[in-house]
Image (cartoon, rainbow, N blue to C red):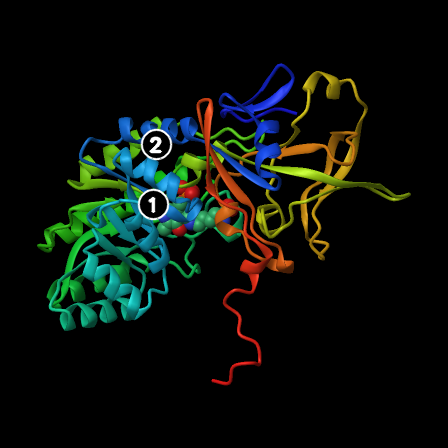
Amino acid sequence: MTIPASEFRYVNGELYCEDVSITELTTRFGTPLYVYSRNHIEKQFMEYRTHLREDGLVCYSVKANTSRAILQILGGLGAGADVVSGGELYRAIHAGIDPSRIVFSGVGKTDEEIEYALRVGILMFNVESMEELENIARIAADLKKEAPVAIRVNPDVAIPSHPYISTGFKKAKFGLPEDEALEAYSFAAKTPGLDPVGIDCHIGSQILSLQPFEEAFNKLKEMVKHLKKDGLNIRYFDFGGGVGIKYRDSDSPFAIREYANLVNKIAEESGTIPILEPGRSIVGNAGAVIVKVLYVKKTRFKNFIITDIGMNDLPRPSLYDAYHEVVCVEAVEAIEDREMKEWDIVGPVCESGDFIARARLFPEVQRGAYIAVLSAGAYAASMASNYNSRPRAAEVLVDGDSYFLVKGRESIEYLIKDEVGLEVKQ
Ligand code: LLP
């Protein structure tokens, strides 16, 4: 059982996050419990900040982890935000991130969301279709504003990642093919209410090779040259998400520095200001979700460790067949002496797709033991739901030897608080 590079480690045989014992946290706050390391988040963000050209902007991708505390930390370090909904825009602004450092992506922006973004004055809309562009122009003209826009280009590159998180292949719903993007730019250039200020792409997430990025960025660089020749003042080059992370020993992501060097070079060659939208690589390995073993069930056919987190708390394994390292919270030396068996580590949700790990070698544990599911800082709490009427878990941020409960555990009353039964006729 190895721990991906992070602030989770064993101290005197017990799992710690930074200088805080996980057992202390579970005793105070119960389980399931998401635990995040402030230090890891800051360190990862600063890698981007230090290596990206000084005038470049690191727009944290809010969808990875929407916690207000995390947004406050990153905003305080100078991060902008990449948002994909009015809700994320609201969260980012309320955590103190200046709208002039926010980019808004996504294929389905509603009129209300567009109006909200125009009123607060975001840096730019990453526009994904002709109809969206026309709609933004209309709303901006009604508000007597000029909307700063970038066209999201779909560069049609193949990437080695799960198909659900690949976005830059030609039949994906995202962006416009190069030729159609050029048409969108000429429409934007002549339409009142639109100011084409940038170019954008995002080819996918958890990519462990630089090559597809290089291919995509070079295509966009040529487009920028072409657009500039046509008289458009393209100032911003939004390169999309960040680097992939290490979920398991065999993952070998490239360094943030290498990625930033590539981005800086393309920005230089295209005479643009670089923007990056990293999410996973900032928060992914900053977090773990701590769970309790409810039952150990051994049948003639299979062994199960049944825990108190379900696919509603950590949907990644069920959705993408994703691998998360799983370790025990208690004394590691004691565990290593125990016999390893193959287990399915599962949750209480009533679906066979509800699992954390399948056919995993793991020591024999007992009912009541605590387990940490690692690399759960990104796309875990932010993707959690109330399926099976399960209140969402609490979240704690650790900072050295202190910690903050940054989101309380939902109550069962919360589950029905907005529901109206048949008592009130509409
Ligand atoms: N920018 C845009 C436009 C995006 O769509 C995304 C992620 C990012 C930035 C951030 O990418 P990152 O730096 O995190 O790779 N739920 C999936 C991941 C979905 C990613 C969607 N887009 C998962 O759990 O793997």
Residue 365 location, x and y as percent? 77, 31
Q: Residue furthest right?
A: 300
Q: Residue at x 62, y 59 (%)?
A: 389
Residue 41 location, x and y as percent? 40, 31
Occupied quadrant, residue 258: top left
Residue 181 location, x and y as percent? 26, 60
Quadrant where the N terminus is found in the figure: top right
Q: Amino acid type of disc 2?
A: Phe
Q: Is residue 186 above or below residue 261?
A: below
- Element type at marker 1? loop
Residue on which the image places disc 2: 45
Cβ at disc 1 under 8 Å from ligand 1: yes
Q: Nearer the viewer, residue 365 or 272?
A: 365
Q: CA distance from mark 2 to mark 1?
A: 15 Å
Taking the image as drawn, is residue 278 in sight? no
The mark that comes first in sequence, 2 or 1, is: 2
Q: Nearer the viewer, residue 108 or 188?
A: 108
Q: Nearer the viewer, residue 118 or 405?
A: 405
Q: Amino acid type of disc 1?
A: Gly
Residue on which the image places disc 1: 240
Point out the frontmost of discs 2 and 1. Answer: 2
Crowd class of label 2 (few under 14; some 14 to 19; many from 20; radius 10 Å): many
Taking the image as drawn, is residue 108 in sight? yes
Crowd class of label 1 (few under 14; some 14 to 19; many from 20; radius 10 Å): many
- Element type at marker 2? helix
